[in-house]
Amino acid sequence: MTSTKEQQRRVRDYRARRTVHEGKQRRLRRDNVIAVAAVVVVGTLAGLGQWWYVDSTATEEPTASETPSPSTEGTASEAVPDPSLAEGRDWTGTLTINGVELGIELDGAAAPQGVSAVVNDIQTGYYAGKTCHRLTTAERFEVLQCGSLDGTGAGDPSYQYGPIENAPADQVYPAGTIAMARGGTGGGLSPEDAANSNGHQFFIVYGDTEIPNDEAGGYTVVGTVTSGLDQLVADVISAGTAPDPATGTAPQDGAPLNPVTIDAATVE
């Protein structure tokens, strides 16, 4: 009799321990699921947050179908020169990129504010040593974007100006065009803010390019490359963009494969 009771007790104890163990396993599985779900949610929100920041501030890394734009927000600064600096005349000079000297001409009558800003940046030595951080190679969207404050595509929040000047009515920017990058309404800026978000960054069009207007309009064309563009394409742009580390494929819109630097700039 004692043996039977002992055996029954052991069975009850075993079942009790098994119930406790199974409960712990269920809680462990539940906690793991919650933890994984939390990681996914946090990662997704972080990714969306990063995407929103890049897109809303127009950065610079937009796809090739998007517009040239600096990654910056802020208000105009007193450092922006008065449009009168352009003197309503043509300015000629040079822009040397990776050893390739480009002849340039700036139209101070068509874009007085934009040209004044570029002339001031050249005269004060801002552009020397700055990089060209973005290259697009898509058909009908062929630009090299330069002049970022820190080389990442970021702009200077304290240096912004407008309005948009001399934008092409047909939204086509011919090869050789020099135009100013700005923020876009697709990134969350109002049309007024986007129109007044020009800064230091500019882009050189090396192949006929179509850039659709956004709600703010087009892009300020400050001038043209008058010589050396073919050499720039052969020596610098032909290398293409840097491959994506994840895929090994060179994107149509990204950082140049080889570093691209503005050696010097002159104007008179």
Image (spheres, rainbow, N blue to C red):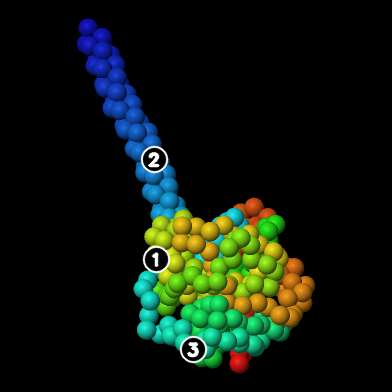
Q: For residue 262, what is the image quadrant?
A: bottom right
Dot 2 falls on a residue whose secondary structure is helix
The quadrant of the rendering that contains the C terminus is: bottom right
Residue highlighted by disc 2: 37
Query: Label 1, label 3: how many angstroms apart (C-alpha)?
Result: 23 Å
Between disc 1 and disc 3, whose residue precedes?
3
* Residue 252 falls left or right of residue 219: right
Query: Is 69 on the left or on the right of 258, as rendered?
Result: left
Q: Nearer the viewer, residue 107 or 4?
A: 107
Residue 56 visible to an observer of this rendering? no
Judging depth in this view, the residue of 189 and 134 nearest the camera is 189
**What amino acid type should be assigned to the residue bearing mark 1?**
Asp
The x and y percentages for residue 205 are 66, 69
Depth check: give the residue in front, 192 or 65.
192
Q: Which mark is residue 85?
A: 3
Residue 35 screen position, x and y as percent = 37, 42
- Label 3 packing within 10 angstroms: few (<14), some (14-19), many (20+): some
Task: Name the mark nearer the viewer: 2 or 1.
Answer: 1
Give the number of the mark in front: 3 or 2: 3
Q: What is the number of the mark on residue 193?
A: 1
The three-letter amino acid code for the residue at tag 2 is: Ala
Q: Secondary structure at mark 1?
A: helix
* Of pointers 2 and 1, the one earlier in the residue sequence: 2
229 left or right, relative to 219: right
Q: Looking at the image, can residue 29 be seen? A: yes
Q: Identify the residue shown where x is 68% and y is 55%.
A: 249
Q: Is residue 8 above or below residue 82?
A: above
Q: Quadrant of residue 256?
A: bottom right
Type of amino acid under label 3: Leu
Q: Name the residue located 29 percent from the left edge and 23 percent from the top edge.
A: 19
* Callout 3: SS: helix
